[in-house]
């Protein structure tokens, strides 16, 4: 299983694409879901919709890295407390968004650089330097800061992606991006030694931002339909 492939949400849609069920817990995804062999998705809960046996549905899985994959399936069990869906092997699996090991999103979040290490020497600040995070994924960040860093510098950054607590992580500078006239515009950095909790933290943030983007797009599409008199 590739990094970031942990599934954090599952959506079930009918043949018209209407949502039937959405769950962020209480589901079991088989480890062979991507293989050419029989696999059953089980969803448990309360007051689940009851569908007829063999009803065709679409199942959309969302991973903590932001990948969204759609599978075709058929209902095998559907009662108030459980729904089982058999994945159909008819080559209708679709990647709904760019599938990549580390899904990257553009943001504009302020953070802090607490210190950096160069050639085993630690450079600390009386006051943290402000950094701007321009994009982030579970592999690293692209950031700008008023400090001239070098490739292989190890920086400690802190950024408040959620209000409850900040992300505090070490990242190694992999590349220096320059703009017109050779001016440094930012640094591409790779996270070092993230814990599982930190990976989940970043994955939840990516999922939140993606959800907000999809909601805005859906609202814009509905507004456009109303403006042009679409059905």
Image: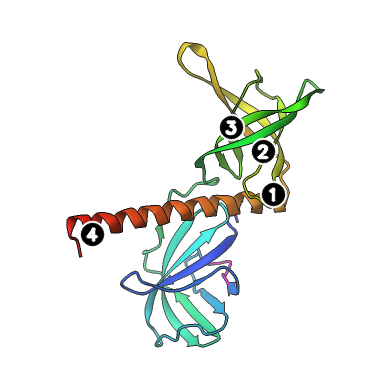
The residue wearing badge 3 is: 132
Tell me the quarter of the image containing the N terminus. Answer: bottom right
**Looking at the image, do the residues carrying marks 4 and 2 touch, with CB atoms under 8 Å apart?**
no
C-alpha separation, residue under disc 1 versus residue under disc 3: 19 Å
Start and end of the magenta stretch?
28-32
Q: Is residue 159 above or below residue 176?
A: below
Residue in view at x 61 percent, y 38 percent: 140
Instruction: Note whether 130 is above or below 83 in the view shown.
Output: above
Question: Camera-side residue: 162 or 56?
Answer: 162
Marks 1/4: CA distance? 42 Å
Tell me where residue 27 appears, x and y as whole percent: 58, 73
Residue that protrudes farthest toward the top in the picture: 181
Question: Is tag 4's residue or tag 2's residue first in the polypeptide sequence?
Answer: 2
202 left or right of 105 in image: right
- Looking at the picture, tell me which residue is in the foreground, 39 or 174: 174
Label 3 packing within 10 angstroms: few (<14), some (14-19), many (20+)? many
Badge count: 4
Give the residue pinned by disc 1. Answer: 198
- 98 left or right of 146 in image: left
In the current view of this chain or complex, which residue is farthest to the left?
229
User: Residue 93 appears in which quarter of the rendering?
Assistant: bottom left
Q: Position of residue 122 (x, y in %)?
A: 81, 24
Could you say where residue 124 lies in the image, as x and y percent from the top left? Answer: 79, 24
Q: Residue at left 68%, top 31%? A: 172
Tell me, yes or no, whether the two marked residues, 2 and 1, touch with CB atoms within 8 Å. Answer: yes
> Helix, strand, or loop for circle 1?
helix
Between marks 1 and 3 in the image, the one whose residue lies nearer the viewer: 3
Q: Residues within 10 Å of mark 4 (few under 14, many from 20)?
A: few
Magenta span has 217?
no
- Check if mark 3's residue and mark 2's residue have beta carbons within 8 Å: no
Q: Nearer the viewer, mark 2 or mark 1?
A: 1
């Amino acid at each position: 299983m590739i990094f970031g492939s942990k599934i954090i949400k599952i959506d079930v849609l009918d043949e018209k694409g209407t949502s039937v069920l959405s769950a962020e817990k209480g589901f079991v995804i088989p480890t062979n879901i991507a293989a050419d062999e029989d696999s059953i998705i089980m969803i448990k809960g309360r007051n689940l919709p009851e569908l007829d046996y063999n009803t065709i549905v679409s199942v959309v899985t969302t991973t903590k890295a932001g990948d969204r994959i759609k599978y075709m399936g058929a209902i095998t069990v559907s009662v108030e407390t459980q729904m089982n869906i058999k994945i159909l092997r008819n080559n209708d699996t679709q990647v709904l968004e760019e599938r990549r090991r580390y899904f990257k999103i553009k943001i504009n979040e302020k953070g802090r650089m607490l210190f950096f290490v160069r050639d085993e020497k630690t450079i600390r600040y009386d006051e943290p330097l402000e950094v701007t995070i321009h994009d982030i994924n579970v592999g690293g960040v692209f950031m700008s800061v008023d400090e001239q860093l070098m490739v292989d510098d190890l920086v400690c950054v802190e950024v408040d992606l959620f209000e409850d607590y900040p992300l505090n992580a070490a990242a190694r500078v992999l590349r220096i991006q320059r703009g017109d006239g050779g001016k440094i515009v930012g640094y591409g950095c790779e996270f070092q030694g993230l814990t599982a909790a930190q990976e989940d933290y970043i994955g939840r943030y990516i999922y939140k931002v993606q959800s907000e983007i999809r909601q805005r797009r859906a609202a814009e599409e509905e507004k456009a339909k109303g403006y042009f008199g679409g059905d």
